[in-house]
Structures are given as structure tokens and as C-alpha cells.
Image (tube, rainbow, N blue to C red):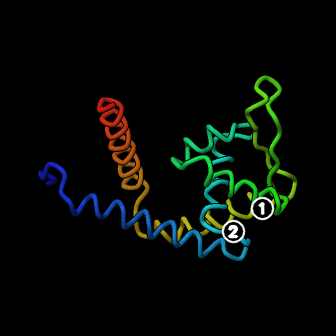
Amino acid sequence: MFSEPMPLHLIALFARTSQKCRRTVTEYVAHLDLTESRWRVMIHMALLGEGSTQQTLAESLEIEMPSLTRTIKQLETAGLIKRIVDDKDKRSRRLYFTPMGKGRMNDIESTLAALRDEVYAGIPDDELNTVALCLKKIEQNAVRLLEASK
């Protein structure tokens, strides 16, 4: 039974697991010529949907705009994404995958599908669902606490 209020080992486990998963994904998508910052931007773009703004993407990734801008320029130079000035707000840029970027995103998704089976090996779906629900609740609680502290 889990009875400790918020043990340090649980916080450390969250951080360590996140780091190891990111490193594993980076290694598995390396053949696609993608660094961690690049695949993370592409995945978040796909999750948010094409046409999302750079600001929305920065918020989703929880990174500063200069870091995101640098990565977007790299992806743009590689021919994977394009930025289009928003018709309604000329200061804002909307992000879209190029045809080559869509192909690369498909490659990322198929690589991650195979990797998922390996990372989740031996864990029943009901346990994975429970973990996902718990992590989502912990995240929501942390966001609520951060907002309350402002």
C-alpha cells in the first residue's frame, strides 16, 4: 500500500524514467537524423495539429521561445516543416509539416510503435491504463498548485 505523502524516491523515479525514455527514443530515431529537440517538436506539432502557433507549441513543450525558434529553423532548413504568417495576426507564425516532414513523422510513429511494445513489455494494458490515469492526475494537481502559487 502506498502511504507516504510524496516520497523523494517517487519524484526521482518520475525524473529518471522520463530521462531514460527520452534517451531511448532519441537513440531509436537517430537513423532519421533527429535530435531529441527535433523529434519532440515534431511529435508535439502532430499532437497539437498542423497550423498551431509557435507560442502554443512552446507552451506545450514547456520551453522558451528562443530554444523553440532555433529548433524550428533547423527543421525548416531540413525541409520538414514550414512556418506561415498568420493571416489574422502578422506577429504569429503557424506551423505545418511539408510532404517530406509528413513522411518523417510517419517514420517516427512507426519507430515509436515498435519501441512502445518493447518499453511496455510484460505490463498488462490495465496496469498501463492505471499508470497513465495516475500520472495525468498528478500532472493536473501539480498544474493546479503552480497556478495557485502565482
| Of residues 106 and 95, the one drawn nearer to the viewer in this rendering | 95
- Between the C-alphas of marks 1 and 2, the distance is 10 Å
Residue 16 placed where, x, y %? 36, 67
Quadrant (top left, top right, bottom left, bottom right) of the N terminus: bottom left
Mark 1 vs mark 2, foreground winner is 2
The answer to the question of whether label 1 and label 2 lie on touching residues, with beta carbons closer than 8 A, is yes
Q: Amino acid at mark 1?
A: Arg
| Of residues 52 and 21, the one drawn nearer to the viewer in this rendering | 52
Q: Which residue is mark 1?
A: 104
What residue lies at 63% left-to-right and 38% top-to-bottom?
Answer: 55
Q: Is residue 116 above or below residue 54?
A: below
Dot 1 alpha-carbon crowd within 10 angstroms: few under 14, some 14 to 19, many 20 or more = some
Residue 52 placed where, x, y %? 70, 37
Residue 44 placed where, x, y %? 62, 49
Q: Quadrant of residue 86?
A: top right
Q: Amino acid at mark 2?
A: Leu
Q: Which residue is mark 2?
A: 34
What residue lies at 61% left-to-right and 55% top-to-bottom?
Answer: 67
| Of residues 104 and 134, the one drawn nearer to the viewer in this rendering | 104
Q: Which secondary structure, mark 2?
A: loop
Q: Is residue 147 above or below residue 115?
A: above
- Mark 1 and mark 2 lie on one chain; the one further toward the N terminus is 2
Q: Is residue 94 above or below residue 110?
A: above
| Direction top: furthest residue | 88
